[in-house]
Image (cartoon, rainbow, N blue to C red):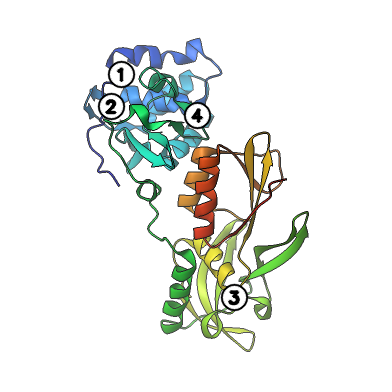
Amino acid sequence: MLVLGATARRGLDFGDREDEIANVATTFPECDAIEYCRGQLAALSYVSATAAREVHVLRLRNTFERARIAHKLRYALNVISLMREAQELGGGYWFPTPLRVVPVDGKTILVGPATTKELKRHFLDVTRAGYARVFLPLSTQELPIQELDNWLGLSIRDTVAWAGAEIERARSGMGPTIPSGNIEFFSVGTAWSAVGSIARPKWTNDARLSFSGERGVVLCRERLGQASFRYFFGLVKHARLVAEFPAPRDTARIQFGLAALTGKPCTVTVFPRDGESVFHIPIGLPRAERQLTLAVGIRDISSAGRVYRIRGEAFASIVAAKLRDLGCEVRENRV
């Protein structure tokens, strides 16, 4: 990751625009919460063209209350944090990250907390893709470059190999367990769809139906609340849980890897529609892949399940490639 420090804006001077940005609620009462958050963070953090200061969330909340969109503050902060346009420092403080570009197969993602309107003053062809702003790289030669995987924070390139290594590590480190009645076991099921049989992870109460990896090691979860779980690896013998080992923190990623190890990788289907590639993904993605998909695509909440619309062959291709690296089977339907 680029080291957080003075925000390099390359001439994007917000000092003389702070009043304009702060008063956007009066001019645009139905303003976009994400763009508004970007503008407020950029204005409030401004010190000079090459320096910035941290901003407390209460100052941001005050501006959102004036705009009558205080209920959207957490959502907006989550988005710009996911896009790595801002860093949460702790204690309620936020800091803008440096303006930089991320090359993606002939196009460029522009990362920074400035509003899209402000960026257009300096880069005329900037457009919103998903949550990110993208454009051709012709006018970005002076901006710092960050590689895609570095921007995504993606350190695991082969999820399937990583999952296999995690199972082996768990097998050699098993400790005692006290099984409760709320244990579920990871499995992979199949279902029929318009494109044939598709595989997706599922959870079962029956250990005999779970995916047993290296010598009976399975992924388990214990329900702690309505939507809260404790994940761990378990050792199953004669359909009974007899030992356990902590699961890796990235519980979303391990599920994709384990599904591929069963020989039933998660099925992702891609359909063309109105010039877009529509991705149907069976379960929630790990952070890095979710960041990329939401950066260049739009979640289609009108469709059942996790459906994302991505415009542009370059972006659709890189998303498909990252999903294959995750262990998915990506079926691209061209008709």
Residue 209: x %, y % from top left: 68, 77
Query: Of label 4 and label 3, which has the lower sequence position?
Result: 4
Viewer-nearest of discs 4 and 3? 4
Residue 128 badge: 4
Marks 2 & 1, CB-CB < 8 Å contact: yes
Residue type at mark 3? Ser
Regarding mark 1 in the picture, which secondary structure is present there?
loop
Residue located at (45% from left, 31% from top): 133
Viewer-nearest of discs 2 and 1? 2
Residue 180 badge: 3
Residue type at mark 2? Arg
The residue that label 2 is drawn on is 9
Marks 4 & 2, CB-CB < 8 Å contact: no
| Residue 247 makes an appearance in the image | no
Q: In the picture shown, does residue 135 fall above or below 207?
A: above
Query: Of label 2 and label 1, which has the lower sequence position?
Result: 2
Residue type at mark 4? Arg
